[in-house]
Image (spheres, helix red, strand yellow):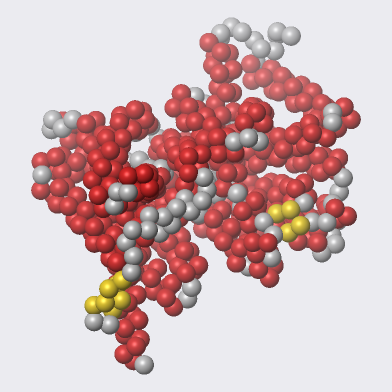
Amino acid sequence: MPEGSQRLISFWVGTVLTGLAILAPFGVNEYYQSFLLQVFLVVALAQAWNLISGMTGYVSFGHAAFFGVGAYAGALLLTWGFPWWAAILHGAGIAALLAVPLGFLTLRLRGPYFAIAMLGLNEVGRIVATLWVDVTRGGTGFTLSPALLPSLDMKYFSMFGLALAATLLVAWVHRSRFGLELRAIREDEEAAEMVGVNTTRNKVTAFVLSALIPGAVGAVYAMYTSYINPSSAFDHARNIEMIVVVLFGGSGTVWGPIIGAATVMVLREMLWAQFPAAHLAALGVLLLIVVLYLPGGLVSIVRERQQRRPDARPGESP
Amino acid sequence: MELLEADILLQLLVGGLLAGALYALLACGLNLIFGVMRVINLAHAELMLMGAFGAYVLFNIFGLHPLLSLLIIVPVIFVMGYYFQRVLIERVVERPMLTSLLATYAVSIILINIGLLIFSADFKSVPVLQGSFLVGDLVVSKPRFTAGLISLVLTVAVYQFLERTRLGKAIRAVSEHAQVAQICGIDVRQIRMLTFGMAAAMAAAAGVMLSVIYSFWPGSGIDFIQKCFAIIIIGGMGNFVGAFYGGILLGVVEAFVGGFFSTQWAEAVAYLLLVTVLLIRPTGLKGVARA
């Protein structure tokens, strides 16, 4: 059974990677630990985007807004003296609470209309964060005093935990009936509705789940950088990154966002520091190439090779 | 007091109409593309900014007046748009709409960041037209008047072209039903390239007009594309005339909200209008049937 052996491979690769990630802080210096933390950040965000856009085909151009909300919620709670884990939980909770009405409103819109409606969401978040000075301190932003912050190890493991949780969530959704229904929506929403799929409930559930993760990640990000302002919390580049990473790796798959995140982050590390604009332009070129020539992402290359050898049984080879 | 308020209303109305004419020029191009090929061009605002930066460069290097640089920029961007369609959009036009959405999104990211590399993130402007003139008690700003008037003339000219010429009729035919048009002997591919060229040229012209009114930087596009979406959804996707009225409407509403509340709220008007319309009619207001 190719399906079963693929799962087995996935399981072992996942276990080994998880083990390495847990051991990493004991073996690498702070620079690499920070880099890994950022990779996990991107993995978690990409999986979140994957959950709604990869699975249902409803492309969200505004998911970074949930990240921004989580970052502000986390920063506020920390300055009010709450422990770091409470800040993370509230970041997730508040983002999810916002996503409920938002999901009911925007997910009634089909395909491109949903994309258009979401395109402005991050911008609205930035405007609100700038204008609502009483709570957000406006453009000045938050500086979190080091005394309030957990250690780098704590932040590292939090971010890793979120990346892992997001991946497991996607893996579970992928296999479940719920995931099957989401993909049915992607293929043909009307047909899905006709065979009795509750499309609204499924879409909104996926949307809320996919808002939960960036909310939590935003809170950890606020601790990690110890300073946030409207333009760093509601950074449009983060939307671009999520989309590029997922499409590059392979949308609607469990491994796609991980492979995409690792590749894009290494590329970014090579370009980023000197040329932020060049880095984004490069992401744009990457996105274009993927959309034109590799619609299934990197994951699809592996898949196709397997399909070309129908007699090959991946489970049998070591 | 009564009189004063009437004055203010008229002032806001004229300001709104002039701004609206510029929006209309921009949105009509976007809607033309959507009508003919069912592609939402997320890079439309960046084409506009190409026009604006073109005017900026020509003014700073050759001292060319933006109204003259219009004569250079419009044909150049037309040709660029034509080949852009041929090289890129033709590859995605037959694929699901999300593919073209992502492809044009990628192009928009690339253009913004190339713009940042060349021009940095500083705000630029082309300060040639300044001051204002009086019509009765009405104060009309010269740059806004010029930009609004030229935008109006160009939009009407394109409309007349679509209505009256053979080529314009062919474009409308492809917009109505591409397959039937093909059967009737229209070279649909050619029409699509022409359409993209025209829409790009309209966007670039809007950009030149923008450069005499506002300051801009490579990332300015997001505000305008947002407005364009609101306009074409209000006016009907693919509907040229609808986009014209939608543009005028948005300009006027923004002017009134800006006049009575604050300009920051005026920025949010387009988004609120967009969301409201989409919520009332989840597939957008009347417009071409979806392919």
Q: Residue at x 35, y 40 (%)?
A: B39
Q: Quadrant of residue B223?
A: bottom left
The quarter of the picture where the C terminus of chain A appears is top right
Residue B36 in which image quadrant:
top left
Residue A61 seen: yes
The residue located at (38%, 70%) in the rendering is: B255
- Please determine whether, in this image, residue B198 is positioned above or below residue B252: above
Q: Nearer the viewer, residue B126 or B290?
A: B126
On screen, residue B37 above or below B270: above
**Depth check, front residue: A141 or A309:** A141
Q: Residue furthest bottom?
A: B1
Where residue A106 sits in the image (x, y, percent)? Answer: 50, 54
How many circles with numbers are drawn on the protein?
0
Q: Return the residue nearer the eye: B239 or A166.
A: B239
Q: Residue at x 84, y 42 (%)?
A: A152
Residue B121 lies, with reference to residue B276, above or below; the image says: above
Please tell me which residue lies in front, B10 or A289. B10
Report the side of A143 relative to B158 (left or right): right
| Residue B115 % position (x, y) | 46, 41
Position above or below: A142 against B75: below
Whether residue A161 is visible: no
Q: Tell me where residue A279 appears, x and y as whole percent.
A: 58, 35
- Look at 52% across and 26% down and name the residue there: A296
Q: The N terminus of chain A lies in which quarter of the figure?
A: top right
